[in-house]
Image (spheres, coloured by chain):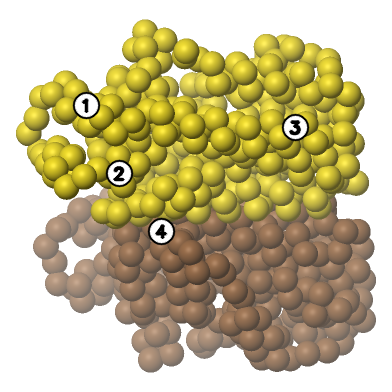
Chain colours: A brown, B yellow
Amino acid sequence: MNTLKNLQELIEDAVHELQYPVYPPELYEPITYILSVGGKRMRPALVLMACDMFGGNVKAAIPPALAIEVFHNFTLVHDDIMDNAPLRRGKVTVHEKWNPNVAILSGDVMLVEAYKLMMQVDTSVLRQVLEIFSNTAVGVCEGQQIDMNFEQQADVEIDAYINMIRLKTAVLLGGALKIGALIGGASLTNADLLCTFGEQLGIAFQLQDDILDVYGDPDKFGKQVGGDIISNKKTYLLIKALELAGINEKKILNNWINSANFEPTDKVNAVKAIYNSLNIRQYAEQAMQEFADKAFVALDQINLPEDRKQYLRNFADGLMVREK
Amino acid sequence: MNTLKNLQELIEDAVHELQYPVYPPELYEPITYILSVGGKRMRPALVLMACDMFGGNVKAAIPPALAIEVFHNFTLVHDDIMDNAPLRRGKVTVHEKWNPNVAILSGDVMLVEAYKLMMQVDTSVLRQVLEIFSNTAVGVCEGQQIDMNFEQQADVEIDAYINMIRLKTAVLLGGALKIGALIGGASLTNADLLCTFGEQLGIAFQLQDDILDVYGDPDKFGKQVGGDIISNKKTYLLIKALELAGINEKKILNNWINSANFEPTDKVNAVKAIYNSLNIRQYAEQAMQEFADKAFVALDQINLPEDRKQYLRNFADGLMVREK
């Protein structure tokens, strides 16, 4: 079996070999640009890993792995327009570097190009793989819409939040693993279990992100601590705090949420103090652990020798212990 | 064989039976809305017609025909954002009725839903059909980008213009026919000939549209006469006029193009007078006829009894004689 690093390098090389037409440049240059901006290539690596785990030919899984990466980058290009984001991975976003129309249209082409890459799978799994991919894509779009709705919504329930992050983030991890497994020759049962593993782990991973925003070590986390608090992002922590808050705490929280002029550090400290008083970190860590546990239960049920599963355990551990 | 009207009704019924989830409503209501706004359902009817022509099962061609219709409507939703269009077929556009983000995202889902419908073809033609569909989709996006580029470009050559309308409008007609033919059991040679027929006819049809904008009977045409002239749209007529114009005529044309305050009727009459003096209508009609001829040459070469081809001849005649 390959190491994760090895698989990430395979993806990196394959991304660099992707060739698009030169005309019209406004359509194709943004694709090369956003793909070159990088990222950890985790999602395509999951396709290769799942294929490898079941003894499949990793080389044959490269085009569908690229499909997942191109699809993921398509969602970034369109999401950045919708979120009016100036930067992505420290670089200027496509709609800022060119303009929103170019970002819409080159994003559209990326979705088609993702299908073209995905179609390069063996005919024996073509229909199945494309169905999973399409359903995953629809899920990701639903997640993005629900996320945008939440921004305008005063009350969001924990279950609705979990469903949103499942759709927006986790289904693509599950879909990538399921597609890789089927290409690798896994049974549908094993592929479905691996899909569940990816989805539940994805939810746990997003919850960890919510926790790290507030409680992470700024040196290790690489993001502004409290960024979610400053922007009133409805994370698991805020939703849970609003749920558990007494009248007074709720008033303080809402004051900070509605305040337009504030010193960021003051807001972060005040909201964090309420989180602490309500034990929000513990609730969040418990929820995270529950989803991680569900992921590992699914992994346990997969009918493969333990040493092959170790692969994904290592990957999951790598994801989940960035801090601690 | 069925009549065109019969096929259009089949499509209309199938469009009404399309069901999308209810949640999140911002994602799915726009799909039902734009599909209900109508249009003549010509593109999906072409899929059924081509299938029928080769003796295929028209019922089996309904999902891919719907795929073409959903895809076409996806392009309308995204194009309308880019063109900042307030109305489509007399109704408020999706980005105006909801907002641009909703239009981007529900458009994205429509593209995925189009693939899901297209995938319902028989496995024997699945890969082939999806390849044609993907290449067609990329072509349409290229055409839209080139069209947007032309708006900012002073000099556009006739050949570049023909290539743009081929991509933006004609390849989808060719693709619809080719997909329908393959589903109907046509050989690749016959399917390719039918594709050429559709593409060349599509170019002729777009040139006719350019001519009708200026020379059409307003009662029959259903659009504002001279709308292209008023908005400086780079049509075959304007490009040809700028190519053939002497120094004086070029000056007058450019004055009107650069004028911000004018009486629309004055501009239309002045530009039309130059078109007339340069015989632009004749040039345009000759070009249109050349593309229509190429279309019929391809149709002639298709290896089918003449009575089966009559079907498409009638369709083409119906398209090309709206005026005269």
Label 3 or label 1, whichever comes before in sequence order: 1
Disc 1 crowd, CA 10 A, few/some/many (<14, 14-19, 20+): few
Which residue does the image show at 7% across and 34% down from the upper left? B261
Determine the secondary structure under disc 1.
helix
Residue A200 lies left or right of residue B83; in this view the side is right
Name the kind of residue labelled 3 in the image: Leu
Would residue A289 be found to the left or right of residue B116 on screen?
Answer: left
Q: Which mark is residue A144?
A: none
**Residue occupied by mark 4:** A103
The image quadrant where one finds the N terminus of chain A is bottom right
Disc nearest the viewer among 2 and 4: 2
Which tag is nearer the camera, tag 3 or tag 2?
A: 2
Q: Position of residue B291 (x, y in %)?
A: 58, 36
Circles 2 and 4: CB distance less than 8 Å? Answer: no
Amino acid type of the residue tagged 4 in the rendering: Ala
**Residue B169, position in %: x, y?**
53, 39
> SS of the residue at dot 4?
helix
Residue hosting label 3: B299
Q: Residues within 10 Å of mark 4 (few under 14, many from 20)?
A: many
Q: Position of residue A50 (x, y in %)?
A: 79, 74
Mark whose residue sits in front, 3 or 1: 1
Image-based side of B208 in relation to B231, left or right:
right
Label 1: chain?
B
What amino acid type is highlighted by mark number 2? Leu
What residue did someone put label 2 on? Answer: B244
B186 or A245, which lies in front? B186
- The Cα atoms of the two marked residues, 2 and 4, are separated by 37 Å
Quote the CA–CA distance across marks 1 and 4: 40 Å
> Is the residue at mark 1 from the same chain as the one at mark 2?
yes
Number of numbered markers: 4
Report, in whole angstroms, how far the alpha carbon at label 3 lies from the one at label 1: 38 Å
Assign a secondary structure to mark 3.
helix
